[in-house]
Amino acid sequence: MKVLFLLCLLTQVPVTDSLDLLVERVHDSMISIDTHNDFSMQLAFPEQRATVTKGQVSFELMKTGRLDAAFFAAYQGQGPCTGEDHGRAKYLADSMLMALHRYAREHRQLGAVAYSAADVRTLKKQGKASLLLSIENAYCLGRDISLVEHYYRMGVRMICLTHNGNNCVADAAMDSLETHGGLSPFGYQVIQEMNRLGMIVDVSHASRKTCLQAVQASKTPVMASHSGVYNLKKIPRNLTDEEIIAIASRGGLIQISIGRYFLSNLPKAEVGMEHLLEHINYVVDLVGIDHVGIGSDFDGGGGIVGVEDMGKMKAITRALLEQGYTEGEIGKLWGGNVLRVMEEVARNADGF
Ligand SMILES: [Zn+2]
């Protein structure tokens, strides 16, 4: 806050205006990254009836909200684990990834697909948004290990091991049954292959055993791309202190989701910035600023009062400044930590 008042004193502008100026300056000097949204399903299959709010994600909104980069997930729910269903899951994932590539191409004046931390930095200098590709639910791999490289070649740099149901790779947090006791033998192979290629292992949606085993199995830091704190909202999808500490102890990240489902038991209309900050502050207090960030879950159920879409991301920066976070800390939380993990994962890759 000292910086803010000094700025007011020097510029002789009211505090509100100067805070707005400071927010802009902070965004000028850092890279902001949101690690999860579900834009792709509607994009690839517009005829699908949406069950959650859509329209929260676009390059235009990213520009308004000063969001520099985002992981766009090729998302799908869990179905039966048969050959035919695995074929369909691959078709869906491929279609969504192709639709995202097409979206970037059709909006090339505003953004592009990014494949590395260096790409994100270059695009920021050009004033363009970075579209990073991820997969939510390794269901699309079926039992075929060669598909990990197939998806790497399609530009995917992060895979979320499960969605709400168990698959051939691992057990999920929201499944009432335990199939593998965490990772399956195939799941261990998948993580090894992701390490070889340079892809981030995403443990959001994973069961507690899967999460803890993935942290140990991966040679590089893992990420929970969109989660909350279990001690603040007791749902299986949120992370326990044990999981948060385990992820952080290996250099990984806990990305807090901007959604009522993760943050609070209050009615949706009453869940806002204070609840998001509560989860962020909890992780910072437990494991430090180097292990926390934002994963909105926009177009997949995300959105709180005051941060309804990507165009409102600056409100988070403002709230963090008001809370007393320094510019350096905000830079880490908003994207510095993610870039660090992306670089470490890429550095440890064996090539393909
Ligand atoms: Zn999700």
Image (cartoon, grey):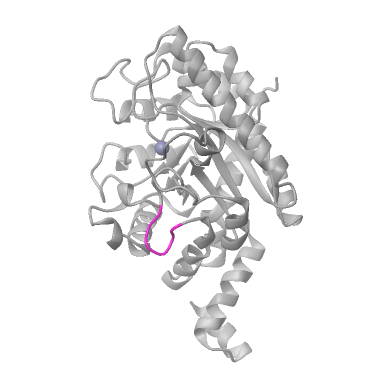
Residue that sits furthest to the front in the current view? 47
> On the rendering, which quadrant does ligand 1 occupy?
top left
Residue 46 highlighted magenta (yes or no)? no
**Can residue 81 be seen by looking at this rendering?**
yes
Residue 22 lies, with reference to residue 75, above or below; the image says: below
Residue at point 42% right, 42% down? Answer: 300
Q: In the rendered picture of this protein, how many numbered marks are placed on residues?
A: 0
Residue at point 23% right, 52% down? Answer: 265
Q: Is residue 319 left or right of residue 341?
A: left
Q: Is residue 3 left or right of residue 224?
A: right
Residue 305 highlighted magenta (yes or no)? yes
- Camera-side residue: 270 or 273? 270
Residue 167 lies, with reference to residue 49, above or below; the image says: above
The magenta-colored residue range is 303-308
- Camera-side residue: 214 or 55? 55
Magenta stretch prevailing secondary structure: loop
Residue at point 27% right, 19% down? Answer: 178
Quadrant (top left, top right, bottom left, bottom right) of the C terminus? top right
**Can residue 113 be seen by looking at this rendering?**
no
Residue that sits furthest to the top in the current view? 83
Residue 114 lies, with reference to residue 189, above or below; the image says: below
Quarter assignment of residue 230: top left
- Camera-side residue: 246 or 82? 82
Residue 136 pos. (x, y %): 47, 31
Residue at point 43% right, 58% down? Answer: 308
Residue 82 pos. (x, y %): 41, 9
Residue 262 pos. (x, y %): 32, 47
Residue 207 pos. (x, y %): 32, 29
